[in-house]
Image (cartoon, rainbow, N blue to C red):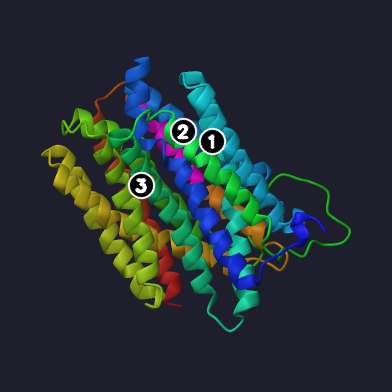
Amino acid sequence: MTLFSRTVPHTAGFWIVAASFLTTMAYSTVPTPLYPLYQEQDGFPVWVITMIFAAYAVGVVFSLFFVGHISDWAGRRRMAVIAVLVSAVSAVLFLVWNDVAGLLTARFVNGVSIGILTATATAHLAELRALSRPAENAIVAASVAGAANLGGLALGPLIGGVFAEYLPDPLILPHAVFLVMLLVVAVLLATTPETARPPSPRPRYRPQRLAFPRTSRPAFIAAGLGAFASFALFGLFTSLAPTFLIDAFHLPSHLLAGVTPFAVFASAAAAQVLLVRVPLRAQLTMALVSCAAGLVGIAAGALLPSYTLFLLGGIVAGAGVGILFRSAIATAGSLAEPGRRGETLALVFLIAYCGLALPVIAVGISLLFADETAVLLVFSALVLVATVAAGTVMRRRAGR
């Protein structure tokens, strides 16, 4: 009997996948508060940090386009294990090659693992929950998936900040610890039940099909816009915020550099869980107000400057985009055709991570010509327009 034939019950498998999803996502943001340390070690300018971060986002987009959708026929469990092992490879790269070229490579590889995992784990969680609790509303599984996704992204910077502030070898130890954790996670994932029902004969490989579901295309477009806008805000706090704390607020604490993005992501994850039973239209109304108020607070905090206002703005905006992102994922999953859930989710995640990559690359280029405060203000204004537009469209459809 092989390891893959020894499976746990569907309920246990659901929580193993959720915990594995959270752990792997957490590792993807552990380097956030470490970037100033890498910058100090190698002496590169701020715009290089945005390029290192963008390498991660490009890796995610690359993976979603070429690999993220194939769990529909290759198997959820198999692709999840592969994703975690690829993340472990990125940890090895961080350990042995940490100059700029190594950081770019390690972040790209880490992005590839996340691109494989996001759609795969989200689909796997939905299917495991449907099998274990068929009468339950599908929004519960979507909420757990969203909380694991954003909760992991929240925990990563906090963990990285603790390592950087209080423990020795902050550019070595966190990667070594997560390498061990990821290997354990891969073994646990191998015991979860397979839920994908691949067609027979197995289809020939092809990249992600850039096509919307055949039904309700306007609803899918609204979901994609919401995912893009949400991840644009997350990109702001995982690329520029730690350095901005040092240069604008004169707060060099590595722990604070981790706490700031943690607070934004944690707010997004908490909003997803706490508001799960509130009617969707009411949730999206809250999201619109939160995004607008929060982004104004971020801009005001940068101008004054006031770190407290900046952080509060991030927390309020984070709650808003958390609702937008969860609503986008739930909408996309509900529109998926039978046997194509992984492909549909891969497409909406592809759109989301384009929202993470493209604005951050634009920020990096802008920093060559303008100071960080001006770039942050313009970026905040653009994200405000995008989030409000997405929320308005999704809210209008939710009322029908």
Question: Disc 1 vs disc 3: Cβ atoms closer than 8 Å?
Answer: no
Label at residue 233: 3
Is 15 rendered above or below residue 67?
Answer: below
Q: Is residue 364 part of the magenta span, yes or no?
A: yes
Measure the C-alpha gap from mark 2 to mark 3. 14 Å
Where, by quadrant of the figure, is residue 183 drawn?
top right
Measure the C-alpha gap from mark 1 to mark 2. 6 Å
State which region is magenta: 353-366
| SS at badge 1 | helix
- Name the residue: 50% across, 31% down: 55
Label at residue 58: 1
Image quadrant holding the N terminus, namely: bottom right
Closer to us: 280 or 137? 137
Where, by quadrant of the figure, is residue 59 drawn?
top right
- Name the residue: 16% across, 42% down: 307
The local crowd at label 3, few if under 14, some if 14 to 19, many if 20 or more residues have their Cα within 10 Å, is many
- Name the residue: 70% across, 61% down: 340
Q: Is residue 132 left or right of residue 142?
A: right
Identity, as a three-letter code, of the amino acid under mark 1: Val
